[in-house]
Image (cartoon, rainbow, N blue to C red):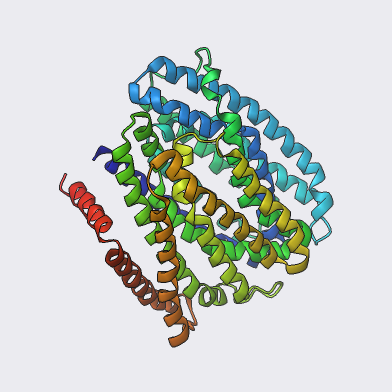
């Protein structure tokens, strides 16, 4: 039950972070577009996504270090813990220097591709340097602490620190933007939030882990999985950053702004799912190193069951409510066309396809199966990059989303069959039935509302009031359907919750 409690702590703190992110992601884009225009909003977001490619210099270090720490933390082996942290610190510093060099190069090159859209090259170069500086801090100050907290099942520390930093960053940007301060100075002053975040990581680490010595000789051999882990990292970067970068370079900054606004809504749905999953990778990793296979099987059955139910609920609500929300949110935006129902539908489809594989993908990380899955990861990354470049000139944002859907569907099929064989030893038919149930309950929830109701709120308050019955209807259909179709797992979940409450 200790693991269940840790999972609860991690989930609650992740919920705090996601609520902060949700509020910030709703408010900031509107302010940015209103004050600075769609081009600047698209530029800032495209720079962030482009620079995210440089995270590949980490070379899979985070995943490999977390995996390497599972066993020594379980055995309380201080020498191995110190050696792995020392090696992580060394490699993070090297990665930080490479990352910084790439940012400097980008500051000279990126304006050549984006400066002809109403923003001068000097402004673009300065924004690249400032936004890149926040990423550099991740390597020089934060990296080794995040690895330690994650492996020690203390993701709640990371979530709470990040929530504070995001809030500080947002307040700075909102205040300065409302005063009409130049966007370059806004981003520069907002950097102080990242300094504050680094300070909080360091202070907590020194107080809670006073005996850990990162200056001992590094155990570099413990991180031998990092090159294979890099492939999984490449997949994440390609999947997340390719759409905005391709749209910015091929379709323009205004189209990138449209994509970012739609993506904002679905980031909120993903935040709900991330909240539930936060910290579970380390918990499953602990079960694997202890070889507690029966406990792992039961825990995974329940996790996948709940995750798919939450996912169905989240995307059902999004499918019904996104267009009414965007009509209110984008009212007054005149420099780009934001009301595009077809794009909304593709975002929903892509969100479902992307999240079907999340439970299985988490076990890849928990089990350290980076080398064994790197070919499949490479194929997935190649699909989204190649198809995006082919389809974007002809179909615009829809083409990029279609490429992402194809990429995710390939990986869904692969992992649904691979993970039962390599990790859980469960039958893949369990997951296949659950995936079919996702689509059944999704359409059973969404179609009646779209056909028999007319949701047309005229204000944010009206939208919230109409969203409440939609959320309740979706919950009743999806929770009821899952309980009726898979009663035994539902009983096991309720029993686990009762045990936690009575502790």
**At 41% across and 55% down in the image, what residue appears?**
429
Residue 141 in the image: state x and y as whole percent: 55, 30
Residue 320 in the image: state x and y as whole percent: 47, 75
Determine the residue located farthest toward the top in the rendered image. Answer: 217
Residue 460 in the image: state x and y as whole percent: 47, 75
Q: Is residue 341 visible?
A: yes
Quarter of the rendering containing residue 337: bottom right
Determine the residue located farthest toward the left in the rendered image. Answer: 502
Q: Is residue 31 visible?
A: no
Residue 147 in the image: state x and y as whole percent: 48, 32
Left or right: 354, with 282 as reference point:
right
Q: Looking at the picture, does residue 218 appear above or below residue 151?
A: above
**At 56% across and 39% down in the image, what residue appears?**
373
Q: How many marks?
A: 0
Q: Looking at the picture, does residue 74 appear above or below residue 478?
A: above
Quadrant of the image containing the C terminus:
top left
Q: Nearer the viewer, residue 196 or 158?
A: 158
**At 49% across and 72% down in the image, what residue appears?**
319
Quadrant of the image containing the N terminus:
top left
Q: Nearer the viewer, residue 175 or 434?
A: 434
Left or right: 221, with 443 as reference point:
right
Q: Nearer the viewer, residue 82 or 239?
A: 239
**At 60% across and 65% down in the image, what residue appears?**
261
Quarter of the rendering containing residue 33: bottom right
């Amino acid at each position: 039950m200790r693991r269940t409690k840790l999972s609860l702590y991690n989930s609650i703190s992740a919920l705090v972070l996601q609520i902060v992110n949700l509020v910030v992601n709703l408010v900031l884009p509107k302010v940015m577009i209103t004050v600075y225009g769609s081009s600047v909003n698209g530029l800032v977001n495209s720079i962030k996504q482009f620079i995210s490619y440089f995270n590949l210099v980490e070379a899979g270090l985070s995943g490999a270090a977390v995996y390497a720490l599972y066993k020594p933390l379980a055995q309380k082996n201080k020498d191995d813990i110190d050696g792995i942290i020392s090696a992580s610190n060394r490699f993070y510093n090297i990665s930080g220097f490479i990352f910084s060099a790439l940012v400097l190069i980008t500051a000279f090159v990126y304006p050549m591709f984006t400066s002809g859209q109403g923003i001068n090259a000097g402004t673009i170069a300065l924004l690249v340097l400032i936004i890149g500086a926040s990423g550099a801090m991740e390597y020089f100050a934060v990296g080794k602490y995040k690895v330690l907290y994650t492996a020690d099942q203390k993701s709640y520390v990371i979530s709470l620190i990040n929530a504070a930093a995001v809030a500080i960053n947002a307040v700075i940007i909102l205040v300065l933007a409302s005063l009409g301060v130049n966007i370059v100075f806004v981003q520069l002053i907002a950097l102080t939030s990242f300094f504050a975040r680094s300070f909080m990581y360091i202070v907590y680490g020194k107080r809670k882990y006073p005996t850990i010595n990162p200056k001992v000789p590094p155990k570099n051999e413990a991180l031998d999985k990092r090159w294979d882990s890099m492939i999984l990292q490449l997949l994440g970067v390609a999947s997340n950053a390719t759409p905005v970068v391709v749209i910015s370079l091929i379709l323009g900054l205004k189209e990138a702004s449209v994509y970012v606004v739609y993506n904002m809504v679905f980031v909120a749905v993903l935040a709900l799912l991330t909240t539930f999953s936060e910290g579970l990778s380390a918990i499953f990793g602990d079960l694997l190193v202890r070889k507690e296979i029966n406990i792992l099987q039961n825990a995974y059955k329940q996790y996948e069951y709940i995750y798919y139910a939450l996912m169905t609920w989240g995307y059902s609500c999004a499918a019904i409510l996104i267009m009414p929300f965007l009509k209110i949110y984008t009212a007054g935006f005149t420099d780009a066309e934001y009301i595009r129902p077809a794009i909304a539908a593709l975002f929903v489809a892509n969100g479902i396809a992307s999240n079907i594989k999340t439970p299985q993908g988490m076990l890849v990380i928990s089990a350290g199966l980076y080398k064994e899955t790197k070919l499949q990861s490479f194929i997935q990354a190649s699909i989204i990059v190649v198809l995006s470049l082919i389809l974007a000139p002809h179909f615009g944002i829809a083409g990029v989303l279609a490429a992402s859907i194809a990429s995710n569907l390939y990986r869904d099929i692969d992992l649904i069959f691979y993970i039962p064989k390599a990790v859980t030893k469960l039958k893949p038919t369990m997951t296949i039935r659950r995936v079919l149930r996702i689509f059944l309950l999704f359409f059973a929830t969404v179609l009646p509302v779209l056909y028999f109701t007319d949701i047309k709120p005229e204000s944010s308050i009206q939208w919230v009031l109409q969203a409440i019955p939609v959320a309740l209807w979706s919950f009743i259909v999806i929770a009821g359907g899952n309980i009726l179709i898979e009663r035994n797992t539902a009983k096991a979940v309720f029993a686990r919750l009762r045990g936690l409450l009575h502790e």
